[in-house]
Image (spheres, grey):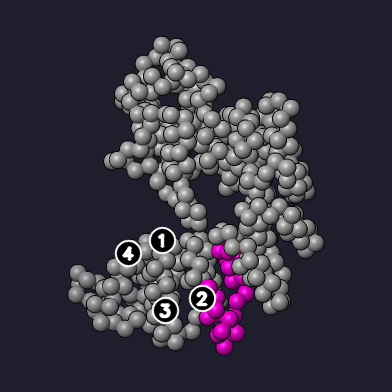
Amino acid sequence: MKAAGVKPNLVVYNTVLDAMGRAMRPWVVKTIHRELVSQEAVPNKATYCCLLHAYTRARYGEDAMAVYRVMKDEVMDIDVVLYNMLLSMCADIGYVEEAEEIFRDMKASMDSRSKPDSWSYSSMVTLYSCTGNVAGAEGILNEMVEAGFKPNIFILTSLIRCYGKAGRTDDVVRSFAMLEDLGITPDDRFCGCLLTVAAGTPADELGKVIGCIDRSSAQLGAVVRLLVDAAAPSEPLREAAGELLGGARGVVRMPYCNCLMDLAVNLSQMEKACALLDVALRLGIYSNVQTRTQTQWSLHLRGLSVGAALTTLHVWMSDLYAALQAGDELPPLLGIHTGQGKNTYSYKGLATVFESHLKELDAPFHEAPDKAGWFLTTSVAARHWLETKKSAELVAV
């Protein structure tokens, strides 16, 4: 159209904005929107809806909120679907104040099509749960019940996660009982949430959470019991975990592995953590964890939980020690890649945890100034350090 000198009208612009939003290209959406404004075309409600769809799906928080406020200023109708897209985005990226503003606007709206529904309440509970705001999550749950909605599995999953983070084990059990009273069948994500809670629960209260896991999934409960039983050998755990993970859906296999290894590390059961890692590698749940070239051997930990990463480090250091014992030459560089991302809600990424752990080990790895998320050392420094350590002392748990 441009080559032919044909000027696009608003319908064409809106169509392209919608297409680019569906294609998950928000940067293109921004460019087209700027062009639309520069051509003095007047955006309508359809334009802003396309922009909201694109920015909320891509989690472009500032852009989405800017569009939302323009729609508010121009008193445009916003239905519950658009509101829920905004709330879901806010929950994912930790926009607490923005979500509270949107939720207030929904409740204050005179249009019944804009009032909160069960998905709206679910997003708010998720937001408060992930930020550790127990009172906020409970308040939204009470509002939801008063409005005539029953809690669904998504809300109860978020609530249990919130109680787990706050160390309120009895409330975790109470929320689980609510799920049973409502006749809701636990799914694998709910079981994964219980597993996450178990990984952070003190040993003296762990039995309460394991009881909930047992009633949710007998197979998962059996694996957890083998893991926490200090007297149980590693081989039965290896077999049970292999059957569990081999039959699990792909989307939950890595979270299950991460949580199980977190639990093992927290209980100082490194041998069982290593057995779990071996199962995960054999099933292809973790891939390309170790890479080797002529100039650098690397350990890739991005996407792993702290427990899984520490377990993988333990195995890697043992492998390096074995290589030295066999007379192999180390490459000039050795590197650990943790990534540089931070958790949305805790502001603490794996790199921060690992930097502290490497200092505890007196390991010669140092953060690379020109490679974000990498810790590097030379073969000379690594050899000296490895030779002063015994393999059993390589990782302090």
Distance between mark 4 and mark 3 Cα atoms: 21 Å
Q: Earlier in the sequence, mark 2 or mark 4?
A: 4
Residue that carries the numbered disc 3 in the rendered image: 69
Distance between mark 3 and mark 1 Cα atoms: 22 Å
Distance between mark 1 and mark 2 Cα atoms: 24 Å
Based on the picture, tell me whether residue 184 belongs to the magenta stretch: no
- Image x and y of residue 326, in percent: 45, 11
Q: Earlier in the sequence, mark 2 or mark 3?
A: 3
Badge 2 element: helix
Disc 4 residue crowd, few under 14, some 14–19, many 20+, Cα 10 Å: some
Q: Which residue is at a point 41% across and 85% down the rendered structure image?
A: 73
Residue that carries the numbered disc 2 in the rendered image: 102
Q: Which residues are magenta?
A: 100-128
Distance between mark 2 and mark 4 Cα atoms: 26 Å
Is 164 placed above or below 182 here?
above
Amino acid type of the residue tagged 2 in the rendering: Ile
Q: Earlier in the sequence, mark 1 or mark 2?
A: 1
* Lateral position of residue 128 relative to residue 239, left or right: left
